[in-house]
Image (spheres, grey):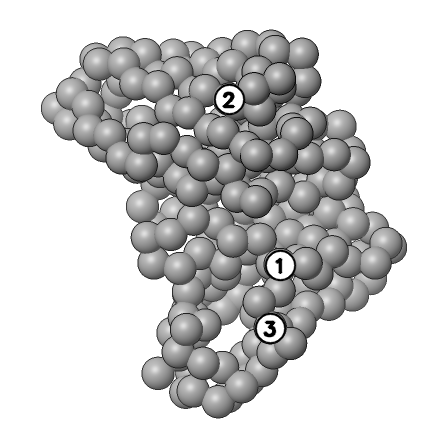
Amino acid sequence: GAGVSQSPSNKVTEKGKDVELRCDPISGHTALYWYRQSLGQGLEFLIYFQGNSAPDKSGLPSDRFSAERTGGSVSTLTIQRTQQEDSAVYLCASSRGGGENIQYFGAGTRLSVL
Amino acid sequence: QQPVQSPQAVILREGEDAVINCSSSKALYSVHWYRQKHGEAPVFLMILLKGGEQKGHEKISASFNEKKQQSSLYLTASQLSYSGTYFCGSRGGATNKLIFGTGTLLAVQP
């Protein structure tokens, strides 16, 4: 596609429910990243996928968070048993995976946990 | 560890200059600079690799001193369109992962 696509753009859920956030990277990009941005805060690294290698999960805040990337393309970030502190904008980015490795960001999913 | 940026916020008049600094406690392989406008996704500005090079993009340039583990972003003759939050992203080695800095909010007023 022309750019990184994320869906849904907004998600409101109740505390304790599970949510799935989707990211479609730029075609041909082998690297995919998830970040979390709380209101007025910076970009918190969550997880990074590079080709067929094992993902770098070092930024996931708890075992309620998981992500997968199917077929080296689309990725899903899952948050189980959501808590109010999970409310944030979740950003996805993709890159070629080599060279300068510029990251291109999607518009994000704004998650609100009531 | 997250790179520290300074200042946290700066307000300018159109035409004024600004410098944003990014310091890391870890050795850096490269530094990326991004700008994020309110409610939008971050957008790539430039990348600096080891070697102390400087780069320029219109009236925005940057430097990278790997010995000091620091990078600076220079905005000259600022325009209203420069307003936003600027993030540096540090890359520490073979990984493509970026750790983003604390951010600097820049507001340019007429």
In the rendering, at what x and y percent does residue B108 appear? Answer: 21, 27
Give the labeled residue for mark 2. Answer: B71
User: Does the residue at mark 2 contact the one at mark 3 (Cβ under 8 Å)?
Assistant: no
In the rendering, at what x and y percent does residue B76 appear? Answer: 32, 12
Q: How far apart are marks 1 and 3 (CA)?
A: 9 Å
Q: Residue at x 38, y 24 (%)?
A: B20
Disc 2 marks a residue whose amino acid type is Ser
Is residue B24 rendered to the left or right of residue A63?
left
Q: Which chain is mark 1 on?
A: A
Q: On residue A62, which mark appears?
A: 3
Disc 1 marks a residue whose amino acid type is Gly
Residue A5 seen from this side = no
Whether residue A91 is situated above or below residue B60 in the rendered picture: below
Q: Which residue is drawn at 62% across and 64% down?
A: A60
SS at badge 2: strand
In the rendering, at what x and y percent does residue A113 appear? Answer: 39, 79
The part of the image, by quadrant, that contains residue B69 is: top right
Q: Which chain is mark 3 on?
A: A
SS at badge 1: loop
Front one among B3 and A33:
B3
Q: On residue A59, which mark appears?
A: 1
The 10 Å Cα crowd at callout 2, few under 14, some 14 to 19, many 20 or more, is: many
Q: Which chain is mark 2 on?
A: B
Disc 3 marks a residue whose amino acid type is Ser
Front one among A79 and B30:
B30
